[in-house]
Image (cartoon, grey):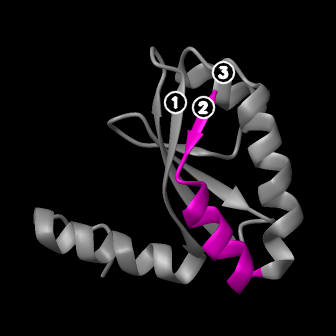
Amino acid sequence: MKLVGRNILDAFIRKHTDARKWIENWVTDVKGAKWTCSQDIRDRYPRADHLGDNRIIFDVKGNNYRMEVQVAYKRGVVSVKWAGTHTLNTIRNISRERENGTTRYT
């Protein structure tokens, strides 16, 4: 797979050095992968959350952090959209839900 958004990961691991090894292993895994559907990711990362629009949330380093990517299976591209703490991910979700008028988080 081609990886887009490496700059997001680089900024993330500069701030969260304890996640460097996990991210580096994930990058190596992605570059060697040939994911053609979401099941390919589920087989390798069973704890990843699969959202709509081919977005995937990965638990980074034991779920201390989260990383959101979007996969274009036919083009073979994985685009990193965001990486950060689990708490910041929850805040992002709350903001999205308020914008969409949903109430999963209260």
**Distance between the Cα atoms at labels 2 and 3?**
16 Å
Mark 3 or mark 1: which is in front? 1
Relative horizontal placement of residue 87, taking residue 74 as reference (left or right): right
**Distance between the Cα atoms at labels 3 and 1?**
14 Å
Which sits in the foreground, 50 or 17? 17
- Location of residue 6 by image quarter: bottom right
In magenta stretch: residue 2: yes
In magenta stretch: residue 18: no
Mark sitting on residue 2: 2
User: Is residue 103 at least partly visible in the picture?
Assistant: no
Residue shown at the point (84%, 59%) measured from the top left: 22
Counting from the top left corner in percent of width and height, residue 79 is at 49, 44
Residue shown at the point (69%, 46%) measured from the top left: 47
- Location of residue 31 by image quarter: top right
Is disc 2 in contact with disc 1, using a CB cutoff of under 8 Å?
A: yes
Q: Which residue is mark 3?
A: 40
Residue type at tag 3? Asp
**Distance between the Cα atoms at labels 2 and 1?**
5 Å
Mark sitting on residue 17: none
Question: Which range of residues does the magenta coloring cover?
Answer: 1-16
